[in-house]
Amino acid sequence: MSPLKDDPDRLLVEACQAVAPDGLEGAFRELYDTYKDRVYNVCFRITGNAADALDSSQETFGILFRKIVEFRFESKFSSWVYRIAVNAAIDQKRRAGTRRTAAYDLEDEQGRPRELHDGREETPTQYATRNELEDEVQRAIDRLSPKMRAITVLRYVEDLSYEEISETLGISLGTVKSRLSRAHDALESELTPVLDKHRLGEDA
């Protein structure tokens, strides 16, 4: 496979490859700042809780910094980062097993109250209802198999195209479509009763 010429991260990655990593300084700091939120978000959605997401995020960046000198732009750099994050999160999820129950509450991963999405004032009931729905969606994602969970997060949370998912996970476009179709069916089965219940509550 020939190296990609137009990767938007190319100059930053080459700057990192030109120097040995010495903590989060210079180009490595910029790289970390560019990807830290995306990596954490993928890890959180796959693992289902903040503690495991932090662990798998740290593992992702540890691998990235150790192996960045080996990257040859045969795929997009972002695809490589996502691949490491997905694998780290799945591995962490498997290691965690049942030792933790995912924390779904009205606080964010740092323990602060969650911010409103659209900036408009909500009543306590509206706030609780919205967060309950978000939690139900995360629970439904968490009940998918690791492979379907990863592909769902990349498509609908990170908004990757089918082609980008194929490159990231190293699977064919047909497999991407097949897994997404199965994930759709599973999520629809899980979430339809929940959405119907909330609609009934709103109409009451």
Image (cartoon, rainbow, N blue to C red):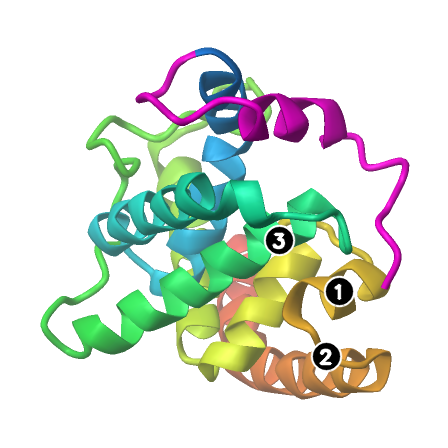
Examine the rendering and report whether any part of residue 139 can be seen: no
In terms of depth relative to the viewer, which is nearer, 94 or 136? 94
From the viewer's perspective, is residue 182 above or below residue 187? Answer: below
User: Where residue 139 sits in the image (x, y, percent)?
Assistant: 39, 68
Residue 151 horizontal side relative to residue 176, left or right? left
Q: Main secondary structure of the magenta part?
A: loop
In terms of depth relative to the viewer, which is nearer, 71 or 82? 71
User: Where residue 126 sits in the image (x, y, percent)?
Assistant: 44, 39
User: Where residue 96 sits in the image (x, y, percent)?
Assistant: 18, 71
**Residue at the (61%, 21%) spot, across then down:** 15
The residue wearing badge 3 is 80
Where does the magenta region start and end?
Answer: 1-25
**Residue at the (38%, 62%) spot, across then down:** 89
State the SS at label 3. Answer: helix
The residue wearing badge 2 is 171
From the viewer's perspective, is residue 114 above or below residue 165? Answer: above
Residue 14 magenta-highlighted: yes
In terms of depth relative to the viewer, which is nearer, 125 or 190? 190
State the SS at label 2. Answer: loop
Which amino acid, by three-letter code, is at mark 2?
A: Ile
Closer to the chain start, of discs 2 and 3, is 3
Q: How many marks?
A: 3
